[in-house]
Image: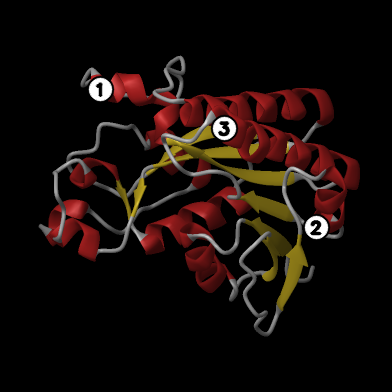
Amino acid sequence: MGRKKVLITGAAGRIGAVLRQGLRECYDLRLLYHRTVREAAAGEEVALGSVADLAAMAAAVAGVDAVVHLAGDPEVDATWESVLEKNIQGVYCTYEACKNAGVKRVVFASTNHVTGFYEQEGMYTTPEMPVRPDSLYGASKAFGESLGRYYVDRYGLEVVCLRIGSFQPDSAIVERQSDRILSTWLSHRDCVQLVQCSIEADVRCGIYYGISANTRAYWDIQNARQDLGYTPQDNAEHLV
């Protein structure tokens, strides 16, 4: 069997740029851009369009084996109008296009803000606890998780949802303004490994927190270790 072809939506973003570098040795990549367009390297294809446009997504997913869906408004204080188009319509078009094209696996970039009010109350949080979004952004990502479950049960799609923590370079820990990042950090190399595990793991559906092996973590990643084979290499404490 040849190399898998993987579509990365939101490829111009911070996470997309890191995954592009980290996954290109394992997969043939198709990179979906909307406004900011990067030049393709060897083994890469470029696609253009909005994730909120079903026709554009149909073209983008054609012939791929998996989709890593990063595109959307990443701002915690995003407006309703923005999350409605970019996060809610966008994730619907992604799942629907994959269903129609026979793409089996979607890795959905969710967020820790899906359960943000647990954090505000100082509660250790596990993935099976009911959602408690702290923003319209968090609520839009909770919708994406729930819609993914529907596409799994109704259409047989495989959906892995990653509640990503503080995706930052090492320097962000050294230069931190608060200690929160010591609990919530996801290093670049652990992010690449987590996404690759999510593409390859023998799972139909799951929700996993995306952080490194932080000593002070208050989000549980045990199911990511067990289900996905995720073995984080980094710990924010080691950079303090």
Image coords of residue 183 (percent x, y) = 22, 41
Along the viewing direction, whichever of 132 and 88 lies nearer the viewer? 88
The label nearer to you, 3 versus 2, is: 2
Q: Is residue 123 visible?
A: no
Circle number at residue 60: 2
Image coords of residue 25 (percent x, y) = 58, 76
Q: Residue at x 73, y 51 (%)?
A: 50
- Quadrant including the N terminus: bottom right
Q: Is residue 145 left or right of residue 210?
A: right
Q: Which residue is mark 3?
A: 206
The label nearer to you, 1 versus 3, is: 1
For label 1, the SS is helix
Residue type (three-letter) at the residue carrying disc 1: Gln
> How many badges with numbers are in the image?
3
Of mark 3 and mark 2, the one earlier in the sequence is 2
Residue type (three-letter) at the residue carrying disc 3: Gly
Of mark 1 and mark 2, the one earlier in the sequence is 2
Q: Is residue 49 left or right of residue 188?
A: right
Q: CA distance from mark 1 to mark 3?
A: 24 Å
Q: Residue at x 63, y 23 (%)?
A: 146
Q: CA distance from mark 3 to mark 2?
A: 24 Å
Q: Which residue is mark 1?
A: 120
Q: Is residue 207 above or below residue 54?
A: above
Of mark 1 and mark 3, the one earlier in the sequence is 1
Residue type (three-letter) at the residue carrying disc 2: Ala
Q: Are marks 3 and 2 in contact (CB under 8 Å)?
A: no
For label 2, the SS is helix
Looking at the image, what colour scheme do you see?
Answer: secondary structure
